[in-house]
Each structure stands twice: as structure tokens, then as C-alpha cells.
Amino acid sequence: MSLFVFFALSRAYLQFRAHNTSLMAFIFWILLWSSTLVVVYWPHLIDYFSHFLGIQRSIDVLVYFGILFLFYLIFRSYIKLQELEREITELTRNIALSPLKKDK
Amino acid sequence: MKTIIVIPAYNESKSIQQVIRDLQAGGYSDILVVDDGSTDSTYELVNKENVSVVQHAINRGLGGALGTGIKGAVMLGADIVVTFDADGQHAVKDIEPMIAPIRSGAADAVIGSRMLGSKGMPASRILMNRIANIITYLLFGIWVTDSQSGLRAFSGEAASKLRIRTRHMEVSSEIIREIKDQGFRFTEVPIEAIYTEYSLSKGQNFFLGVKTFIKLFLHRLTH
């Protein structure tokens, strides 16, 4: 597991160095993967958290938050996609209308 | 007053020339056709006619084409913008009563309602139209008798303020929302619907209607 985490971290670092991802995204991935590592080595840490939330099984906390996080990502990409579609329409529109500008 | 007829057209090579000629015969010479990236000969056929035509490089849907047409008509200095379907379902004689309230200054936006006269509309279409009206009312809070009508008229000022953001059939309801949000003075005028086998094969069917509803709902949530 920790080998996999280190692999993922190195990928994130390489992507960042190649300027494919922003600093914010890089920090986000580092936080995500290092917290995974922390949980792998000290699993009882989640117990405090799940006890605090009133959820009995610690693993359920992970699943709940995982699903919430995925939903959030889907929603975000939906918004992004809409924005992209709108920009393409705008672009198509302006290209289509450019001959009208010249005539009149 | 300069009246420009906007015709959004996507793969309408069968009907577009007749529609243009009917409009010209009815005395409407300022016509702007938006070819929405048709894959048939629509653009070539329209180019042969004595009208303005702009072309989308790729298909963007009815909403995209209407937005382009209305913006283009404003650029060409229209005092009145009329949107007219390319499939031949509208009657040219219905245009005059639609632009009259705008010319007299009584309205900023007019929608031609096929339901007020309700002539020639098949029963299945009437039912679907009722459902669409109810959905439009629930989502946007404005009651119209034909929310999906393609025959509309706007004053030049209203047309320049109109913001169209959706891409497909949901644009009809979006325009109605815009009429409400922007506080346009609005009226409905009865129009005739000419349903031919051809025009029935185009436009909405039930599943497209469900899809349109889902999109409208998401649109309502996110804007």
C-alpha cells in the first residue's frame, strides 16, 4: 500500500514538474495521498473521527466521504462541461457572424 | 421599421427553399438563415436564394442557432426580429398579427401560440405541449399556452438583451424565462400550425421531451 502511495506521489510530482498540473492540484494530491498513508499506518485515528460523527464502523466513514467527494467531482465536471459547451457555441457564433460585420 | 426574419435550419434541404420563397412572396425580404452545421445541401440551397445566410462550422443545436440568428439580426439593424421555423410549419400570414403589437409599442415580445386556435395539431402533440407548458410554469413561473412555439417576435431592443445559453430544444422554455426575468412586455397571438408528415418527423418526440426536461431542470439548478 505504501509503495502504491509513493508511486502515486511521484506521478503527481512529475506531472507538476512538467507543468501539466497547477500548484494547487499538486498540494491537493500530496495532502490526499499522505493522509492515506497516515491512515494506513495508524488506522485507529479514524476511530476518533467516526466516534465523533456517531458512525459505528470506521470504514463506513471512509466510504461515506468517498461517495460525497465523488458526487462533488461529478457536479464540478458537469459545470465545467457546460461552460465548455457554451464557449464553443460562442466561438461558433462569432465565426459565423464575422462576415456580417464586414458588410455593414 | 426593419423586420428581419430569422430562420434556424439544420438539415432542412427539403423545405427551406419553399419557406424562403413563401416569406418573400408575403413581402418579407429581410431574411437571415442560420445554417447550424447541416450535413446536407441546406447551405448551398440557401445561398442560391436572395437572403443573408450565416453558417455554423459545427452543429450547435436549436438554441445555438437561434442565439446566432437573433444576434445577427440585431447586428443588421433590425427593429423587429421574428424567428420562423425552417420546416414549413408556420404560415406567413401569421407574421403580421405578431409584429403588430411590437410596432405599436404594446409589447416587447410576442409568442405565436398554436394552442389558442389549436387548429391542425395532432392530439399527441397537444398532450405533450400541455406537459411542456406545465413544466415551464413549475420551473420558471410563467404561464403560456404554447411554450414550445417556434414563431416568436421581439423588438430590436428586447432581442439585443435576450441571453440564450442553452443549446437544444430547451431554448424555447429558456426564452420564456428570459421574457419574465427581463420584464419584457409579453403577449400571445394565435397562429396556425401546418402539420405535414415532414414537419412531424422533425421536432420533438416523447423521449427527446424527457431529455429536454432533465436538461431544463439541471439548468434551473445551476443558473
Image (spheres, rainbow, N blue to C red):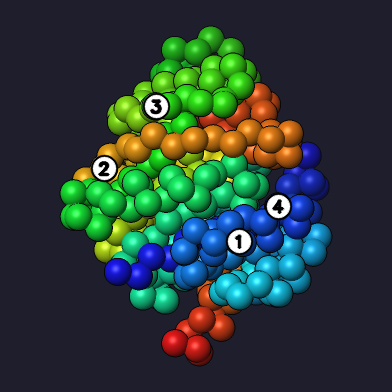
Please give the residue where the numbered disc 1 appears in the rendered image.
B20
Question: Can you tell which mark lies on residue B186?
Answer: 2
Q: Quadrant of the N terminus of chain A?
A: top right
Please give the residue where the numbered disc 4 appears in the rendered image.
B15
Mark 2 — on which chain does it sit?
B
Mark 4 or mark 3: whose residue is earlier in sequence: 4
Residue B114 coordinates in the image, percent (x, y) = 47, 32
Q: Quadrant of the C terminus of chain A?
A: bottom left
Closer to viewer: mark 4 or mark 2:
4
Secondary structure state at the residue bearing disc 3: helix
Residue B161 coordinates in the image, percent (x, y) = 31, 60
Please give the residue where the numbered disc 3 appears in the rendered image.
B116
Mark 3 or mark 1: whose residue is earlier in sequence: 1
Secondary structure state at the residue bearing disc 2: strand
Can see residue A47? no
Mark 4 or mark 1: whose residue is earlier in sequence: 4
Mark 3 or mark 2: whose residue is earlier in sequence: 3
Which of the 4 image quadrants contains residue B162? bottom left
